[in-house]
Image (cartoon, rainbow, N blue to C red):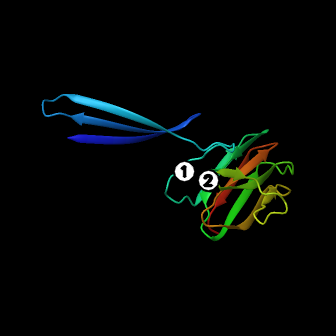
């Protein structure tokens, strides 16, 4: 008899832990555990993603800090990003970052991928084209209140 369990651990580092327990015919039990690190950091270091398409993600960011949503797969259609806050502080803003060629890119004002949201009214949302084969995330810079950013690969 063989039983397997998968556990996803969240913390400062993200790891996939596979644990296997085997019950032998003589009644003895043996257990083995294998830990595999999963990387998705904010720098331009290598990033590993699952093979399942991710269509939406969000993150809430505390005052005077910044944060990232999880990566969302572009599907060759228009997606949507939203930034909202408990305050209407225009110095809280978000940009969309694009993952391709193995690194995260922050498009600038002249790039067709450029998306910028600010909070003049407490909530800001826009649609933008998400290319197939690329990954997208929202990078939030929060200066007051609690800000929440949403990104999704559909309208």
Q: CA distance from mark 1 to mark 2?
A: 8 Å
Q: Is residue 145 above or below residue 52?
A: above
Where is residue 124? Give x, y as percent.
78, 60
**First in sequence: mark 1 or mark 2?**
1
Quadrant assignment, res 96: bottom right
Residue found 39% across the figure and 42% down from its top: 6
Q: Where does the N terminus fall, quadrant-wise?
A: top left
Residue placed most toward the observer, 94 or 14: 14
Furthest toward the front, the residue is 101
Furthest toward the top, the residue is 28
Secondary structure at badge 1 equals loop
Q: Is residue 53 left or right of residue 70?
A: left
Q: Residues within 10 Å of mark 2 (few under 14, many from 20)?
A: many
Secondary structure at badge 2 equals loop
Residue found 19% across the figure and 28% down from its top: 28
The reply to whether callout 1 and callout 2 are in contact (CB within 8 Å) is: yes
Residue found 73% across the figure and 50% down from its top: 139
Q: Nearer the viewer, mark 1 or mark 2?
A: 1
Q: Where does the C terminus fall, quadrant-wise?
A: bottom right
Residue on which disc 1 sits: 49
Where is residue 133? Give x, y as percent.
60, 63
Where is residue 118? Give x, y as percent.
82, 55
Checking the image for residue 71, the label placed there is: 2
Furthest toward the bottom, the residue is 77
Q: Is residue 120 left or right of residue 137?
A: right
Quadrant assignment, res 21: top left
Residue placed most toward the observer, 111 or 4: 111
């Amino acid at each position: 008899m063989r039983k397997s369990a998968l556990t996803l651990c969240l913390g400062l580092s993200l790891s996939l832990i596979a644990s296997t327990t085997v019950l032998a015919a003589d009644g003895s039990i043996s257990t083995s555990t294998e830990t595999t690190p999963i990387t998705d950091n904010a720098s331009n270091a290598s990033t590993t993603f699952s093979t399942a398409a991710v269509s939406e993600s969000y993150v809430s960011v505390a005052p005077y800090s910044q944060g990232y949503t999880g990566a969302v797969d572009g599907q060759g259609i228009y997606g949507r990003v939203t930034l909202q806050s408990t305050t209407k502080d225009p110095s809280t803003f978000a940009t969309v970052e694009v993952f391709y060629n193995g690194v995260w890119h922050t498009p600038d004002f002249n790039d067709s991928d450029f998306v910028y949201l600010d909070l003049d009214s407490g909530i800001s949302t826009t649609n933008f084209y998400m290319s197939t084969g690329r990954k997208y995330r929202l990078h939030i810079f929060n200066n007051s209140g609690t800000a929440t950013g949403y990104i999704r690969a559909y309208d």
